[in-house]
Each structure stands twice: as structure tokens, then as C-alpha cells.
Amino acid sequence: MEALTITEKKGANYILLELNGAINSYTLQEFQNRVYAAIQETNLVLDLSNVFEIDSTGMGVLFAAFNDGRESGKRLYLMNMSPQAQKTVSDTGFLDAFNVISSVTEVE
């Protein structure tokens, strides 16, 4: 079974979740809980540099968090996407819809 480790760091106007592993149906529950809680509180930055898989359930969480954030005046940022994460997000056709950044200094 695949694993996902999540490390949380707080900034002035954001929460950064550093993700390491796979975002899929096996790891979804904790990922979903952490993402939904964070986006209700403040802007959310997901560091995807060490993510080697995002399946359709993971993409569903990203879309839902993006929409939840927009409704509550918060923003979801995808940072430093690994090649696998970038391909998955790009293949959905929604890459341009997400706020893609390379550093937390870009959080508005």
C-alpha cells in the first residue's frame, strides 16, 4: 500500500502542506481532511514536488478545495509540481484554472 506524508507549515497568510508520496484512493482520507480544514482557515499552498501520483480521487479533492476556497475568499496554490503531478493536472485540461507558483513568496 502506498503512503502519503503531509508536513504542515504556517505562513503569515497561508498554510503550506508539503506532500510526499501518492495522492490516491489509499491515501485520500487524511489528505482530504487536511486540505478541507486548511482552505477554510486561510490560503492553502500544496507543495507537490515529491508527489509521484495523483489519481482521479485526488484531483477531485483539488477541484473541490479550489471551489471551496473561492467561495470563502481563500486561494489554493499548487507549488513546485513534480513532472507526474504536472502531467496529471495538465491532462485534466484545468492547469490554467489553478494558481501555480514556484515559491510561497508568490502567495497573495
Image: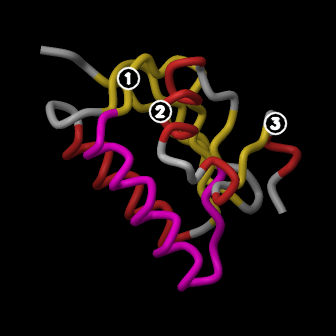
> Is 41 covered by the magenta stretch?
no
**Is disc 2 surrounded by few (<14), some (14 to 19) or many (20+) residues within 10 Å?**
some
Residue 103's mark?
Answer: 3
**Is disc 3 surrounded by few (<14), some (14 to 19) or many (20+) residues within 10 Å?**
few
> Is 72 covered by the magenta stretch?
yes
Q: Secondary structure at mark 1?
A: strand
At label 2, the amino acid type is: Thr
Q: Nearer the viewer, mark 3 or mark 1?
A: 1
User: According to the image, label 1 marks what residue?
Assistant: 53
Residue at image position (30%, 34%) is: 55
For the record, the magenta segment spans 55-77
Q: Earlier in the sequence, mark 3 or mark 2?
A: 2
Q: Are the two marked residues, 3 and 2, in contact with CB atoms closer than 8 angstroms?
A: no
Q: Position of residue 89 (x, y in %)?
A: 52, 40
Q: Earlier in the sequence, mark 3 or mark 1?
A: 1
Q: Earlier in the sequence, mark 2 or mark 1?
A: 1
